[in-house]
Image: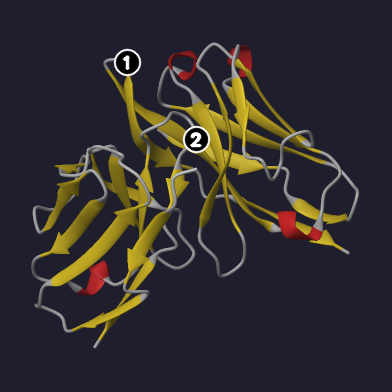
Amino acid sequence: VQLLESGGGLVQSGGSLRLSCAASGFIFSNYAMNWVRQAPGKGLEWVSTISDSGGSTYYADSVKGRFTISRDTSKNTLYLQMNSLRAEDTALYYCAKDNEDSGFTYGYDYWGQGTLVTVSS
Amino acid sequence: EVVMTQSPATLSVSPGERATLSCRASQSVSTNLAWYQQKPGQAPRLLMYAASRRASGIPARFSGSGSVTEFTLTISSLQSEDFAVYYCQQYNNWPLYTFGQGTKLEIK
């Protein structure tokens, strides 16, 4: 299993970025996928989840209305469109795969190495 | 939202000794709890899930226990590679998972 994030960078407050996560080594369409972020020197914060089919999406209150998660099964890729970025969105963004077994999930079993988003004010 | 509280914030232990890390949930999460290890510059790694089940490839010196609101991660004999930050995560209400703030395990 490999998850490879890209798309991070430096952006001004109010700007936009689109993150990508290229997945391989598993049947991408069988698993819900997630974005988790970590501000510099801080802990882990769940950001967003998309169901295996892509039909359901979920967001943390801190990003609701500004971020959009999506997936392209034909490209085995997960996305996070981030608009109206704020200084407090500065973080390392990880994509993570659901640890799913027999219809139940048990946290996240694989993580990418992360892509850094820096929002300047 | 379920708030996860880890203690202590920092734990100093000598190699070869036992380390015990705690995690408390603000409401019942049954045994829907995972532990992750994160080393500097690396992504988190899943250690335990369902409170007490080791993830694939995790050494037997790692064990987890607890249920409802009180959980413990024990490392029986610390190796040099075990010094890291450890996070607990509740997954009782998919997908609105929450993490603890982390415990830094450092060499004494």
Q: Secondary structure at mark 2?
A: loop
Tag 2 residue: B96
Question: Mark 1 — residue?
Answer: A103
Residue A41, percent from left and from top: 56, 70
Instruction: Write the residue at 57% across / 21% down.
Output: A76
Which of the chains bears the disc numbered 1?
Answer: A
Residue B87's place in the image compared with A107, above or below, is: below
Asked where in the image residue B30 lies, by quadrant, the reply is top left
Q: Nearer the viewer, residue B29 or A21?
A: B29
Which chain does the numbered disc 2 sit on? B
Q: Residue at x 73, y 54 (%)?
A: A89
Report the label total. 2
Q: Residues within 10 Å of mark 1 (few under 14, many from 20)?
A: few
Residue B17 left/right relative to A83 = left
Three-letter amino acid code of the residue under disc 2: Leu
Q: Residue flagged by tag 1: what amino acid is it? A: Gly
Q: Secondary structure at mark 1?
A: loop
Q: How far is disc 1 from disc 2 in space, using C-alphas?
A: 17 Å
Image quadrant holding the C terminus of chain B, namely bottom left
Name the residue at 79% across, 60% down: A87
Label 2 CA crowd tier, 10 Å (few <14, some 14–19, many 20+): some
Q: Of discs 1 and 2, which sits in the foreground?
A: 2
Q: Position of residue B1 (x, y in %)?
A: 50, 43
- On the picture, is B85 further left or further right than A93? left
Q: Is the Cβ of the residue at disc 1 closer than 8 Å to that at disc 2?
A: no
Say which of B100 and B53 sits in front: B100
- Where does the image place residue A77, in percent across and percent down from the top left? 61, 25
Q: Is residue B74 above or below residue A82?
A: below
Task: Tell me where residue B13 sits by quadrant.
Answer: bottom left
Q: Farthest front residue? A: B27
Q: Is residue A65 depicted above or below A73 in this figure? A: below
